[in-house]
Image: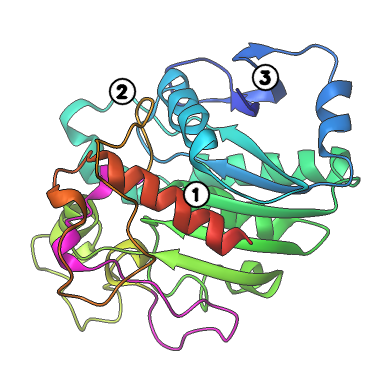
Amino acid sequence: MIYLLDLRATSPGGSLAAQVKVLFNNAQILDPAPFLNAIHGRDVLFATHGFNVTEANGEVNLDDLAPLLTLGPGALLVGVLWPGDADWGALSGAVYPFVGKTSMDAGTMLANYINANCRQAKSVSFASHSLGARVMLQTVRCLDRRARRLILLAGAIDDDCLTGEYAGAAANVDRISVLASMEDKILGRFFPAGNFLSGIITRGHPYWHAAIGHNGPAQPIPGKLDPRAMIPDDWMFNHGSYLPDGPVALPPGCAIPSLLPAPGQPVPCGQTAETAPWKRAWTAAMLSDRFR
């Protein structure tokens, strides 16, 4: 189990709490002293989930990610739960790119908490999945200290965010990494304004933007950005391939592949399913590598 910072007012639903709650073993800690002692002098990685994830599912994503990580000595993973889910039914996939206020407010709330309570951490880093990218970019922009690392997995935010809307966040972090997949059907289908508006705004129009988690970062690329971004197409990484939805166990004879091999290599373990265990293990290995 890991420490979790819970920004939610309720388990399902879309509102922020009045204040951050500290959870351990998925139960609230009324005295934050154990958490503050745990981060003292540590390199802390704050990681969060994406859009349309309940509190319970977010806990599973982050709890089951933790044992897959090898962050190194002196490092500590802290999960972040934010209210990215809303009761929009069939519309949820279509409207999520435009739901910015809750994610931005969550990022500001998290930054304020870190500024007030986490000064004893040796360093702070951030990782996110999907729309959680906006939460963490907003957090980094509002920090009163520099972030060490920022890692965006399948980021559901404009591909030029690092040089545009969140250039201030990019300026406040030492190193940035992006993982993207052209096989991400959610980001490819729902994110671009051209798709949402049925072609009224199309590729090449100045208002059209792909997601950074689909096409990778747009040019110009900031010098502090890790150039290794695109997952090989034949790996079939979809939007749900990154974070675990339960304990991960690799089948016999299946090894975690090397970090971003050249295209054309055999698909690891012969498994292309969106939820193949090796994909979650590989994501954790890549996250660990980029954190270090």
User: Element type at marker 1?
Assistant: strand
Q: Which mark is residue 128?
A: 1
Amino acid type at image mark 3: Leu
Are the two marked residues, 1 and 2, in contact with CB atoms closer than 8 angstroms?
no
Q: Is residue 240 left or right of residue 194?
A: right
- Seen in the picture, residue 78 relative to 11 is either above or below; the reply is below
Position of residue 12 measured from the top left corner of the image (x, y, whole percent): 42, 17
Amino acid type at image mark 1: Ser
Q: Residue at x 58, y 48 (%)?
A: 70
Task: Give the number of the mark in front: 3 or 2.
Answer: 3
- Tag 3 residue: 23
Q: Earlier in the sequence, mark 1 or mark 3?
A: 3
Render colour scheme: rainbow
- Seen in the picture, residue 166 relative to 219 is either above or below; the reply is above
| Magenta stretch bounds | 217-242
Task: Give the number of the mark in front: 1 or 2.
Answer: 1
Position of residue 159 measured from the top left corner of the image (x, y, whole percent): 38, 71
- Tag 2 residue: 87
